[in-house]
Image (tube, grey):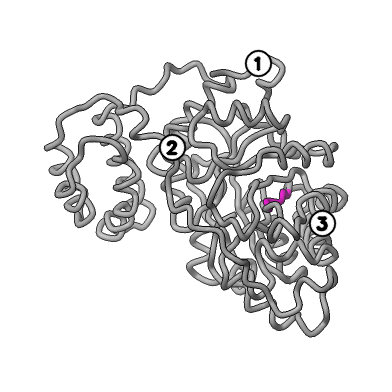
Amino acid sequence: MTLAPALARPLRIGPIRLDAPVVLAPMAGITNTAFRRLCREYGAGLYVSEMITSRALVERNAVTMRLIQHHESETPRSIQLYGVDPATIAEAARIIAAEDHADHIDLNFGCPVPKVTRKGGGAALPWKIGLFADIVERAVKAAGDIPLTVKMRKGIDRSHLTFLDAGRAAEDAGAAAVALHARTASEYYSGHADWDAIGELKEAVTSIPVLGNGDIWAADDAVRMMEQTGCDGVVVGRGCLGRPWLFGELAAAFGASHTPPVDATLSFVAAAFRRHAELLVEFFEDEDRGCKDIRKHVAWYFKGYPVGGELRAALARASTLAEIDDLLGTLDDAPYPGAAAEGQRGRAGTPKRTSLPEGWLESRDVASETSDMMRGAEVENSGG
């Protein structure tokens, strides 16, 4: 499926022009330089870093400073920031701009992790609409010429939706685009994303692009989302786990590439897995660490393929690229298995009551006594 000519258009985020209106969603432990480079080798779009805690960046945490680095081949460069304190987030944005760490900054207001929301961070924060607007406005000013965008969820739960107010506030504060994961925090990743909410946000926010996120498992899903909601682009998260070539399929669907469709035979997938491992070794500058990191990707890459449990387990124990080569060399090629390799990837979780600070829902204003409590939300988590 390809878009109608009227919808097959580039996406502009401030001065950045993307031939394919596609963004890679930040995922903790996944969207490091290695994975971003691999996705870029297959397709086009904007590839965002793992979520960076603003306080850690301001404090020059060594691990964080490494995570914000990009390979020379990465253009444009994108970093996602997370935090709860307007001054700290603004200072983090200023550092990124002043020291030329990125060409684009995204702010995360979508994290549903309990240890974050119970302190008022992540997807809980837009409920305090004044604080949300202050964070975005100050971050936009601090970023200067670098476009700043916002990623959020529908709200805390069905009774406490925030996405329309937050979308308008972000637009008024000078954000270059807004992205909506069309689930509430309480839904986590369960059920089906509410694409109708993306259409509602598109109608409410009219001067900047609106991007849709949720349940994009294949290029056809992205096309349907844009046709159904009128959104300006898509954000892809779990759908590319073990399928970095999805970005090539998306580029073709949006008319940004004329490469032939991928024939994802087992040998093709094995080669992609091997390339990912190689890039991880380069990123970590440590073969053992890189080979350990690729282990979590084994099930995603070989989902639906005739790869036995013993071989999968062996790949999850390999500590050198030579071991991986030997194991992959035992595979016989096999055709793409179709539906068995498609559909949902990653953990969905189950709906649950969102953990919130005591009295959080009683007012949309932030009481002064909550400031110290909220700083506890600045931990290393991701998801949106």
Q: How many marks?
A: 3
Would residue 277 be found to the left or right of residue 127 on screen? Answer: left
Q: Which residue is mark 2?
A: 343
- Which stretch appears magenta? 148-152
Would residue 107 be found to the left or right of residue 43 on screen? Answer: right
Image quarter where the N terminus lies is: top right
Q: Between marks 3 and 2, how big is the CA–CA gap? A: 41 Å
- At label 2, counting other C-alpha atoms closer than 10 Å, the crowd grade (few under 14, some 14-19, many 20 or more) is few
Q: Which residue is mark 1?
A: 4
Residue 278, image quadrant: top left
Q: Between marks 3 and 1, how big is the CA–CA gap? A: 37 Å
- Check disc 1 and report its element: helix, strand or loop: loop
Q: Which residue is mark 3?
A: 141
Residue 137, image quadrant: bottom right
Q: Between marks 2 and 1, how big is the CA–CA gap? A: 24 Å
Depth check: give the residue in front, 195 or 273: 195
For badge 2, the amino acid type reads Gly
Image location of residue 353, percent across then percent down: 61, 66
In reply to whether residue 151 is colored magenta, the answer given is yes
- At label 1, counting other C-alpha atoms closer than 10 Å, the crowd grade (few under 14, some 14-19, many 20 or more) is few
For badge 3, the amino acid type reads Lys
- Residue shown at 69%/72% (left/top)? 120
- Check disc 2 and report its element: helix, strand or loop: loop
- Residue shown at 40%/37% (left/top)? 243
Mark 3 and mark 1 lie on one chain; the one further toward the N terminus is 1
Q: Nearer the viewer, mark 3 or mark 2?
A: 2
For badge 1, the amino acid type reads Ala
